Amino acid sequence: MDKSFISIKRLSKNFNENEIIKNLSAEINKGDLVKVSGKNGSGKTTLFKILCQLYTFESGNIFVDGKEIKKNSFVKSITSYCSSDSIYYKDLKVKNNIIFYFDVLGELNPNDLYTNNKKFLDLESFEDKYPEELSNGQKKRMNLFRCLIPSFEIYLLDEPELGLDLESISELSSKLTEINKLGKTILFSTHNLDSVDFYQRFKKEILL
């Protein structure tokens, strides 16, 4: 059994004839903060989608908590993936969007989970709006709220600060600090390392 919490071994991923990730290996311990680096198109988003089992891969292997992810679907239940795109149900208001998502996750008290945390990123100021009425920054805040409030073991954050104002970035940094102190594992990508204070604490880097 692998000692690392996440063990990536000679991972390769192709799209059609294009090799996006080639022979990537990395060892990540539980509670690590890991920066995923690379130019646009280098495979950062692809790696995140592989780790949360949205994408398959051609060769290599990945183990999470000693289990091969190709043979186990449990990784989806312990991983939060916050994409750079906003994901929502357009016919539900912000509050109901989030509560519905929490319910799908299996949270015992989705309404309470929302109510007790709605000051985070000032969600309560636009909770009664429909997603199509929101600015891009508000959509990003809604997406981050969904991904960061429930408890997971692994957080995959694809440029989470993009589109946020300075106050929201400060709140994001505080929340990530809180999550990491609980021993949760965080992988993030960014084009602006100095934008979030929390990023400065990363100890490992995966270069694509």
Image (spheres, rainbow, N blue to C red):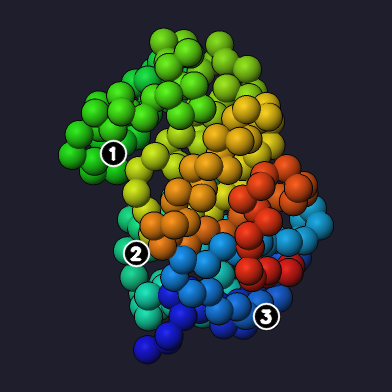
What residue did someone put label 1 on? 104
What residue did someone put label 2 on? 73
Q: In front here: 23 or 38? A: 38
User: Which amino acid lies under the numbered mark 1 shown in the image of this protein?
Assistant: Val
The CA distance from mark 2 to mark 1 is 16 Å
User: Which amino acid lies under the numbered mark 2 shown in the image of this protein?
Assistant: Ser
**Residue 118: x and y, percent?**
39, 25
Q: Which mark is residue 23?
A: 3
The CA distance from mark 2 to mark 3 is 23 Å
- Left/right placement of residue 96 relative to residue 33 reads left
Near mark 2 (Cα within 10 A), the count class, few <14, some 14-19 or many ≥20, is few
Image position of 124 with respect to 54: above or below? above
Near mark 1 (Cα within 10 A), the count class, few <14, some 14-19 or many ≥20, is few
Q: Residue at x 62, y 80 (%)?
A: 25
Secondary element at tag 1: helix
Residue farthest toward the bottom in the current orientation of the protein: 1
The reply to whether residue 45 is visible in this rendering is: no
